[in-house]
Image: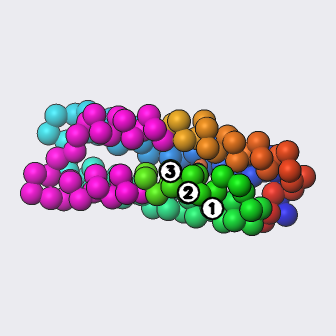
Amino acid sequence: MAPATDYMKMNDTEHAWLDCACEEMSALISQPDYNKRTAIDAITKLKVAMLLHYAEEEGIMKKVCYPHMRSHKRSHDYFLTKVSSFITNLTGASADLSGDDWTEMVRLLDNHVRSHDHNLAEFLSSTHETAPS
Ligand SMILES: [Fe+2]
Ligand SMILES: [Fe+2]
C-alpha cells in the first residue's frame, strides 16, 4: 500500500513526462518541413506513455470505486483516439498534422490534469489514508 501522497508524487512524475513528450512534439512540428518519421515516433512514444499512465489511473479508480470513473475514463479515451488519429494522419496520403488540432489537444490534456486528475487525487486523500497498491 502506497500512501496517497506517494500516488500523487508518482502521478506528478508521469504527468511531467507526458508534458515533456508534448513539448518535444510541439517543438518538432513547429519547424517547417519537419521529419514525418520522427514525428510519428515521437507521438507513438506519447501514446504508449498515455496507455500505461491511463491504465494505472483507471486501475486505481476501479479499486476505490471512484464515483467519477466513467467521465474520467471517457476523457482518457478521447486523448488516445486523438493521438491515434494524429498518427494516422501523419502516415496517410496527406502526411500532415494540423498544428491547431495539436495545440488544442495539449490544452485539453493540461485541463485534464488540472481537473479530472486533481479531483481524483483529492478523492484519494480525503477517503483513503493509503492509496491502493
Ligand atoms: Fe493523469
Ligand atoms: Fe486522468
Q: Principal SS element in the magenta part?
A: helix
Q: Which residue is mark 2?
A: 73
Callout 1 amino acid = Glu
Of residues 70 and 110, the one drawn nearer to the viewer in this rendering: 70
In the image, residue 51 lies in the stretch drawn in magenta:
no
Residue depicted at x 33% and y 58%: 84
Q: Which residue is mark 3?
A: 75
Q: Residues within 10 Å of mark 1 (few under 14, many from 20)?
A: some
- Asked whether mark 3 lies closer than 8 Å to ligand 2, one says yes
Callout 3 amino acid = Ser
Horizontal arrangement in the rendering, residue 65 relative to residue 81 (left or right): right
Residue 9 visible in the current orientation: no
Residue depicted at x 42% and y 38%: 106
Which image quarter is the C terminus in? bottom right
| Range of residues picked out in magenta | 80-109
Q: Residue furthest left?
A: 93
Badge 2 element: helix
Q: Which residue is mark 1?
A: 58
